[in-house]
């Protein structure tokens, strides 16, 4: 599996803000949005473009349009903080929604929403979730989009645990990962260490 770990000072500074326990909800949402912009920018680097003929006020020239803009799929709740900025970066596309809440005792994903196009064949998909911990929530989301025919999936995550990266790599799903950090591991509550805490709670308060 391709794993792209962003190496950029602006990403490091925004990630530090997200990690800092003193960052309040509003500042957390702003920093997440700003970091999403960098992540999506890098995730789109090799996106296919089609040449289009246009005319500037001065001359005819050739421009570009995205050949297949990726469907954006935020995983609620925490992924909601990424979708507005991602959609601003790729306004040509649509948005599907998946809702999953991890069981706090078993750490297993408990799905509660899937609102996706029926047919995703031939359509790139960007799954937006700030946290890849055990990988259970992402694997469930990948299953939903692969069942609908997706074969070109990018998981866009702020922080990933090695366990989550391994779970995606071993899944056999057609996915690559773009992240700002692969952290040290998971604690006994399956939180990423050092991580940034609960990305849903830090944006929206406790469930
Ligand atoms: O890799 P995993 O072990 O599955 O953990 C990662 C999941 O946990 C968080 O969501 P959470 O269940 O806390 O829901 P929330 O976004 O509503 O807070 C996070 O946003 C991921 O979806
Ligand atoms: O560290 C973690 C792990 C799962 N979900 C989060 O929001 N944070
Ligand atoms: Mg949460």
Image (cartoon, rainbow, N blue to C red):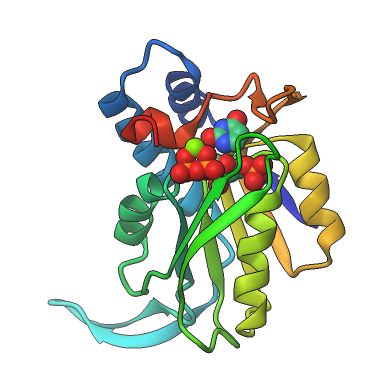
- Considering every residue shown, the one lying at the far front of the view is 105
The answer to which image quadrant residue 191 occupies is: top right
Q: Position of residue 79 (x, y in %)?
A: 44, 49
Nearest to the observer: residue 74 or residue 59: 74
Specify whether 182 is left or right of 56: right
Where is residue 76? Give x, y as percent: 44, 52
User: Quadrant holding ligand 1?
Assistant: top right
Residue in the foreground of this view, choosing between 72 and 9: 72
Residue 108, placed above or below residue 74: above
State the image coordinates of residue 173 (x, y, percent, origin top left): 77, 68
Would you say 202 lies left or right of 142 here?
left
Considering the image in quadrants, where does the C terminus appear?
A: top left
- Residue at horizontal 83%, vertical 67%? 172
The spot of residue 165 in percent (x, y) is 76, 45
Quadrant of the rendered structure where residue 58 is?
bottom left
Determine if residue 200 is in view.
Answer: yes
Residue at the left extreme, as displayed: 57
Q: Please say if 186 is above or below 169.
A: above
> Please, which residue is most extreme toward the top here?
22
Q: How many marks?
A: 0
The residue positioned 80% from the left and 57% from the top of the image is 1
Say whether residue 191 is left or right of residue 94.
right
For this rendering, which residue is in front, 20 or 7? 20
Q: For this rendering, which residue is in front, 11 or 1?
A: 1
Q: Can residue 44 be seen in the rendering of this structure?
A: no
Position of residue 186 relative to residue 93, above or below, is above
Q: Residue at x 78, y 36 (%)?
A: 162
Q: Residue at x 38, y 30 (%)?
A: 206
């Amino acid at each position: 599996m391709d794993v792209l770990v962003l190496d950029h000072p602006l990403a490091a500074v925004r990630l530090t803000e997200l990690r800092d326990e003193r960052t309040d909800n509003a500042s957390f949402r702003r920093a997440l949005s700003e970091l999403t912009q960098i992540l999506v920018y890098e995730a789109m680097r090799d996106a296919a473009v089609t040449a289009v003929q246009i005319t500037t006020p001065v001359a005819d020239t050739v421009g570009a349009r995205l050949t297949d803009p990726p469907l954006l799929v935020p995983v609620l709740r925490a992924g909601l903080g990424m979708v507005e900025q991602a959609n601003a970066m790729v306004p040509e596309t649509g948005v599907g929604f998946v809702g999953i809440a991890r069981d706090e005792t078993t750490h297993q994903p408990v799905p509660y929403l899937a609102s996706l196009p029926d047919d995703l064949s031939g359509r790139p998909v960007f799954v937006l979730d700030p946290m890849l911990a055990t990988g259970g929530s992402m694997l469930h989301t990948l299953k939903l989009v692969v069942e609908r025919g997706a074969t070109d999936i990018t998981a866009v995550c702020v922080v990933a645990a090695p366990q989550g990266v391994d779970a995606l790599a071993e899944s056999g799903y057609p996915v690559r990962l773009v992240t700002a950090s692969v952290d040290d591991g998971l604690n006994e509550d399956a939180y990423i260490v050092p991580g940034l805490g609960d990305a849903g709670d830090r944006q929206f308060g406790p469930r």
